[in-house]
Image (tube, grey):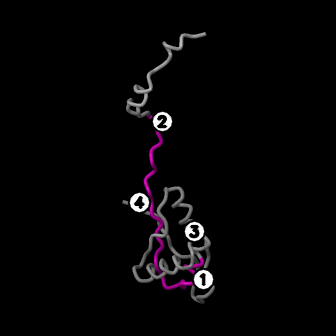
């Protein structure tokens, strides 16, 4: 049987030691905003349905965001990692045209930008 006294470290020493940082620690990825831009080719209903379908937002939140994009010219619809932001931007671009607006020719415009 090995000598347990030699292998045992007092609990106080273990608890009192500061945590050592290693190079392998995971660094947080910087956040990015997904920004939806206003246009005159899409209805509130379209924006609400798109936000429900792509982000799972309830209709009330979708209406608030639709109103903000209409009155302010843009709205941040999500803040996430760059990879997820690019995916959501691409999904907005692929959502299709608004069938309620005859002049509508395609999807809304969205961009990503670094969150401050």
Q: What residue is rendered at 44% in x and 34% in y?
A: 23
**Label 3 vs label 2: CA separation?**
33 Å
Q: What residue is rendered at 56% in x and 70% in y?
A: 92
Q: What residue is rendered at 53% in x and 14% in y?
A: 4
Q: Is residue 73 magenta?
A: no
Q: Which quadrant of the view contains residue 93?
A: bottom right
- Disc 4 or 1, which lies upstream in sequence? 1
Q: Is residue 61 above or below residue 16?
A: below
The answer to whether the residue labelled 3 contacts the one labelled 2, judged by CB atoms less than 8 Å apart, is: no
- Disc 3 or 4, which lies upstream in sequence? 3
**Label 4 vs label 1: CA separation?**
29 Å
- Disc 3 or 2, which lies upstream in sequence? 2
Q: Position of residue 14 (x, y in %)?
A: 43, 27
**Label 3 vs label 1: CA separation?**
18 Å
Report the residue marked by disc 4.
Answer: 114
Q: Position of residue 66 (x, y in %)?
A: 49, 80
**Label 2 vs label 4: CA separation?**
25 Å
What is the count of numbered marks? 4
Report the residue marked by disc 3.
Answer: 55
Which SS class for mark 3?
helix
Q: Position of residue 31 (x, y in %)?
A: 44, 57
The residue nearer to you, when weighing 90 against 71, is 71
The quarter in which the N terminus is drawn is top right
The residue nearer to you, when weighing 5 against 115, is 5
Report the residue marked by disc 2.
Answer: 24
Q: Find the magenta span and give its range.
A: 23-49
**For residue 59, side relative to residue 12 (left or right):** right
Q: Position of residue 50 (x, y in %)?
A: 58, 75
Q: Callout 4: 10 Å neighbours few (<14), some, many (20+)?
A: few
Report the residue marked by disc 1.
Answer: 98
Q: Which of labels 2 and 4 is toward the front? A: 2
């Amino acid at each position: 049987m090995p000598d347990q006294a030699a292998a045992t470290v007092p609990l106080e020493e273990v608890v009192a030691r500061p945590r050592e940082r290693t190079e392998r620690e995971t660094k947080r990825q910087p956040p990015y905003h997904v920004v939806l831009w206003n246009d005159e080719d899409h209805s509130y209903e379209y924006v609400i349905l798109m936000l429900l379908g792509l982000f799972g937002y309830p209709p009330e939140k979708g209406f608030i965001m639709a109103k903000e994009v209409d009155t302010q010219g843009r709205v941040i619809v999500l803040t996430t990692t760059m990879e997820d932001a690019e995916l959501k931007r691409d999904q907005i671009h692929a959502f299709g045209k608004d069938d309620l607006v005859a002049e509508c020719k395609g999807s809304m415009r969205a961009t990503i930008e670094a969150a401050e």
